[in-house]
Image (spheres, rainbow, N blue to C red):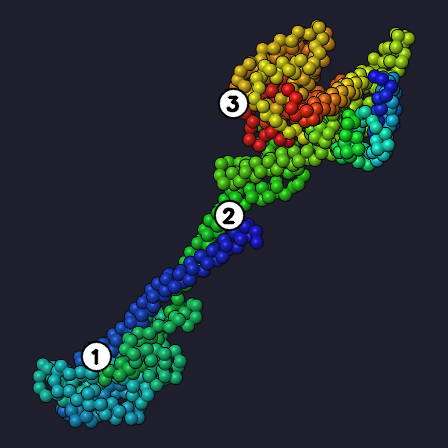
Amino acid sequence: MKIRTKVIFIICIISCSLTIVVAITANLVLLGQFESVQNSYVIDSTQRTGNILQSDIGNIKNACAFESIWDDTYRFVQGQDPTYMQDNFANYTLDNGFNCQIVLFINSSGQLYNYVSYDDSIQHQVPLPAGLVAEFTSHPGLWDFTNAQNYSEGVILLQGEMFLFSSTPILPSNGSGPVMGAYVMIKFLDSKEVQSLQQRAGLPVTLLSIDQAKEQPDFNDAFNSFLQGNQFYTKAVNSSTIFGYEAINDPFGSPALILRIQMPRDIWNSGVLAVDYYIVVVLASIILIVLAFFLFLEKTLLSRLSSLTLSVKDPAKIEGCVNSRNADGVCQICEVKGNDEISTLASSINGMLQEIGDKNNRLRHSEKMVTIGQMVTMIGHDLRNPLTGLQNSAYILKKRLGSNADEMTKQIFELMDYDVKYSNRIINDLLDYSRDTKLDFIKTSPNAIVGESLAMVPVPTNIIVVSEVQTDPKVALDRLSIKRAFINTIINAIEAMPNGGTLRISSRTVGDNIEFFFSDTGRGIDESTMKKLWTPFVTTKAKGMGLGLAIIKQVIDAHGGKISVSTEEGKGTTFTFTLPMKPSEGGGKQ
Amino acid sequence: MNGNVNVIVIDDDESIRKSISIILEDEGCKVDTAESGAEGITKSKAKTYNLALIDFRLGDIEGTKLLTLLSETNPKMRKVMVTGFPTVNNAIEALNHGANAYITKPFEPELLVKTVKEQLAEQEGEEKYGEQKVADFIKTRAKEYANDMLPNAP
């Protein structure tokens, strides 16, 4: 797998994981908080609605207490006020002040003394629901009072119906004296009452008796929760609605009915929206950061690695690293940018390619040289035989003709002699160039080796040779090959000065190197020749193989030295050979 | 040189064999030629040669091998190696295998004549020295013999 693919893969995994973690955390923590706020709000509202119901009970109680501790009522239940009912309940109607549908007078022995049952929707007296009084009076706690402080109130289920009621002791207006029974006000907890409750609470309200509640699954859940001691219960039914439940107990402490309010889940939905926004923002940030990171990685690493790969993939480019070098001769196949690990790698690869290129070139050169060598050795041998025959034949003819030879014949003999020698020189040059240069380092004085070389070259009379070469220090050189190089240099200098001039040979030591200078005052070298100066078999001379300079270079290279040439057309040329004074490591063979 | 000097030229190149023959014959030698090592050996067995000019590389045999073989058949024969491969190694090898001289192609005919003459002169000197030594030995032995015969002589 490519690094780029791996990075993208890892980045995707990290981003996804981060997003998932953020989403889960946001949902658990933030949404949890919103849900809890929502629930508290629902519970508050449920409690508020319950309180409204309680206030209704309070109202009934107030009315009930007002009527029960009253001398008229006290006397009435003792049979002493025959117009009481007429005075207080005209036509047995209950006006708004009573705020109930039924009023019961129960005497101290638990018997119904009198009652009012009125349906204000039909504005008519109605009979008491059957069994209602019997069920009511079956609970002595609801009516059997002993003093002014006793009372009972709340919700109650009678005959399966839900009622609000209040029961207070019947006493004289001063509150003293024996209790003469209970004054009871009962109000139907019907749809009308629920509607009124709804209006005041501003919420949809449902009231179910415990028996009804057990048949409704959501009410049943609430009921079970109340059994565990909870006072309130909330339940979200869908994404937009939540119910709040409260148990309303009867005076005996048992749940009589369950109140349910319905509310929109606004808070929770705001939470969901907030969490969604939060996740989107976090995701966008992660994407941005990841993108920035990837771009950074791409720019600083991946694209550069790719371009490195592309650079080294092209065999034509690498081929010897010859054409991609800068002015300093450093291989530039891989672009070196900045100063970091990649640029170090790039320059290392460049160095390696350069080394490979150089070695390849040397190898190719030496392979070529071996081939040339084999060919030249063969040609040399084959040519030397006919040359010997030719030379011998000329010798025989010359000798036999002796003084009989005319001037022209003598000239021809000389010409033959010269050509044989010249041909032989060509063969020697070729053999010298193609042969492995095995160096035999011997300490010698610079002056001596230049002197020996000069002695081998016939210098025309119109050329002055000035030698200013040091006698010391002694330098370790292969005398034979260095002499060959120097002789070639001297011959070139002489040939560059056909009309005469000065050849100045000097030397100096620089550090561990010795420099030899061969300066002539000849015609100089033109630019086009300079370019291919060291290429074998390239020559400007009418006669010659073009191996003179190639041999010089071969010898100096084999010594681990350097050659530099400065020339000015028409003024002269200086060849400078820089040679190590001691054999360099790895040098000595080529 | 007197006309009794026999020289053999062993070289696979005809122009060289022929031109050397003429040059040396002009100098008064009797020259035979052989174009191969085998022919050279055969001829050297049949006739005593004062000097052989041997090409370093022949078609059938290495020059150094031929040198060894010729030293066995004609130990006194002067052997001059002629080579188109002038290297120090070749020269050392030739001398180690009993060559007396070594010249490289293409050589100056004057050098050839000079070398041949030097070798022949050296050979003559050696022969004379050998003859002198034999004469001295005989004289010494004769004296000793006489002394043995006459033990009581004063």
Q: Nearer the viewer, mark 1 or mark 2?
A: 2
Q: Name the residue located 20 percent from the left edge and 94 percent from the top edge.
A: A111
Mark toward the start of the polypeptide (2 vs 3) = 2
Q: Are marks 2 and 3 in contact (CB under 8 Å)?
A: no
Residue carrying label 3: A512
Residue situated in front as seen by the camera: A297 or A133: A297
Q: Name the residue located 29 percent from the left edge and 88 percent from the top edge.
A: A158
Estimate the x, y position of residue A255 in percent, counting from the top left: 28, 82
Subunit of label 3: A
> What amino acid does circle 3 point to?
Asp
Q: Could you say whether the residue bearing mark 1 is in a helix, strand or loop?
A: helix
Q: Is residue A548 visible?
A: yes
Establish if A31 lies above or below B95. Answer: below
- The crowding category of the residue bearing disc 3, from other C-alpha atoms within 10 Å (few below 14, some 14 to 19, many at least 20), is few
Residue carrying label 1: A61
Residue carrying label 2: A294
- The crowding category of the residue bearing disc 1, from other C-alpha atoms within 10 Å (few below 14, some 14 to 19, many at least 20), is many
Give the quarter of the image for residue A53: bottom left
Q: Name the residue located 44 percent from the left edge and 53 percent from the top edge.
A: A281
